[in-house]
Amino acid sequence: MADASYLTIGKVVKRLQPQYPDLTVSKVRYLEDEGLLNPSRTPGGYRLYSSRDIKRLENILYLQKNRFMPLSVIREELDRLDDPSQAVVVHHDEHVLSSDDEETINKFHPIDRMPELLGVSASFVRSLSDAGVLSLRRSPHGRDLVDGHDFPLIRIADHLRHYGIGPKNLRQYVTAARRESTMFEQALVVYGRTSDEDPQRRHDAYEKALDQMLYLTNELRDELIKRSITNRGDGIHIS
């Protein structure tokens, strides 16, 4: 193994931090402990990341930040990508992992184009609108339009329904998101009062704090749900 072609964990974090400012060595180690990453090690025990390992880490971070997927779902997505027998699925998942271009995001799209653009039916998108997950806009000609910024939400909802979690089940998350956004706004007030005169640095500090809070609250939510499910399963014997 040529060490020159591998990076240590510290260098990996430094490389990815411009895109993911809240990334730390501890977080990468946590992902390793969860079985999502498996880097090589030197005889002395130092982690060495190949380009494949780094790409896998980037995919994990992207799905967490932009698709809001829990680690259990991310693990399944990556396992499918690693399985050569899932060639058709791999093509679909590579599309999911890629971000939409700026022009697509910043436009409104007729709802009848959703099968073509996202592989979901217009009725599914309408059901998401009914649940409050997104809002449709009416064109001057009376056509329902979908905001390109809502495409990530639609993709997440599409993945969830494969687990039996449909649009109606998402109402509770809409309510929770509204409640939590108020809490975050109050917590972030201090970043609007910073003495730093550079607007860009104030903005960066605000974004970094918000990303960190989102990550931590998502992790807390995951652990609480896991604990609740485990506790409910106590005493249940499956034959």
Image (cartoon, rainbow, N blue to C red):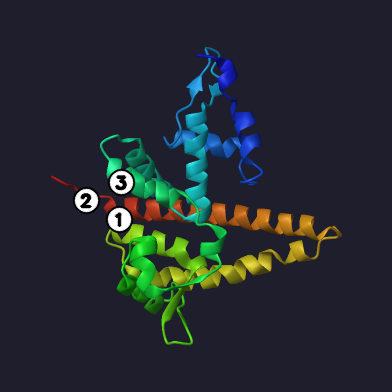
Query: Which label sits in the foreground, 3 or 1?
Result: 3
- Residue tagged 2: 236
Report the residue that reaches farthest toward the left: 239
Q: Looking at the image, do the residues carrying marks 2 and 1 touch, with CB atoms under 8 Å apart?
A: yes
Which amino acid, by three-letter code, is at mark 3?
Answer: Val
How many tags in the picture?
3
Whether 204 is drawn above or below 120: the answer is: above
Is residue 157 visible to the viewer in this orientation of the structure?
no
Answer left or right for 119 relative to 144: left
Answer left or right for 41 relative to 154: right
User: Quadrant of the rendered structure where residue 159 is?
Assistant: bottom left
Residue 125 location in percent, x, y? 36, 72
Which amino acid, by three-letter code, is at mark 2?
Answer: Ile
Helix, strand or loop status at disc 1: helix
Label 3 and label 1: CA atoms lie apart by: 34 Å
Label 2 and label 1: CA atoms lie apart by: 8 Å
Whether 206 is drawn above or below 15: the answer is: below
User: Quadrant of the rendered structure where residue 145 is?
Assistant: bottom left
Q: Looking at the image, do the residues carrying marks 3 and 1 touch, with CB atoms under 8 Å apart?
A: no
Say which of 27 and 99 sits in front.
99
Answer left or right for 196 relative to 179: right
Q: Which residue is drawn at 54% across and 23% down?
A: 48
Helix, strand or loop status at disc 3: helix
Residue 209 location in percent, x, y? 67, 55
Q: Looking at the image, do the residues carrying marks 2 and 3 touch, with CB atoms under 8 Å apart?
A: no
Give residue 89's mark.
3
Which amino acid, by three-letter code, is at mark 1?
Answer: Arg
